[in-house]
Image: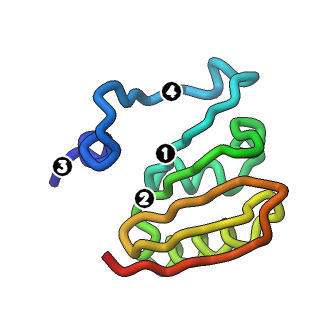
Amino acid sequence: MKDPKDLISQILSVDNLVSIDHSKQPDKVYDFVYLTKSLLHQYLNTKPLCKMIHNDSVILVDSIYNSETDMLNWEKIKKHPKVSVTIDTFYLGFVFVRKEQAKEHFTIRL
């Protein structure tokens, strides 16, 4: 199986995708955050993710249907008050944070 960073880099045509340890840069906010399955579990139970994003941030969530726990986590993300739009592509979940946008959820089968 391909490394998820390689797959995301290929999909988004990004050559310089890197992992960042947010605990070493706690005040930094990001436009785009990619959460693997392990990172999702880490950030869902704590508040650092909300500190990492701003209005107009995009979060890409990997493996949203691999297990029942993943599906429950995806539902938690969709219901979060900061989240305005989610797009479910079965393999990946796109999360958009825009306070001026109405809350919507889209399902797209690729």
Q: CA distance from mark 1 to mark 2?
A: 8 Å
Name the element at disc 4.
loop
Query: Quick one: label 4, few (<14), some, or many (20+) residues within 10 Å?
Result: few
Nearest to N terminus: mark 4 or mark 1: 4
Q: Which quadrant would the C terminus be assigned to in this image?
A: bottom left
Mark 1 or mark 3: which comes first in sequence? 3
Q: How far from the left and from the top, in percent, is residue 81?
A: 83, 64
Q: Which comes before the other along the chain, label 4 or label 2?
A: 4
Of the residues shown, which amino acid type is indicated by label 4?
Ile
Residue at the spot of label 4 = 20
Does residue 34 sit above or below 65 in this rendering? above
* Disc 3/disc 2 C-alpha distance (Å): 13 Å
Reading the image, the residue beneath label 2 is: 62
| Location of mark 1 (residue) | 34
Q: Residue at x 58, y 71 (%)?
A: 74
x and y, in percent, of residue 53 in the image: 71, 40
SS for callout 3: loop
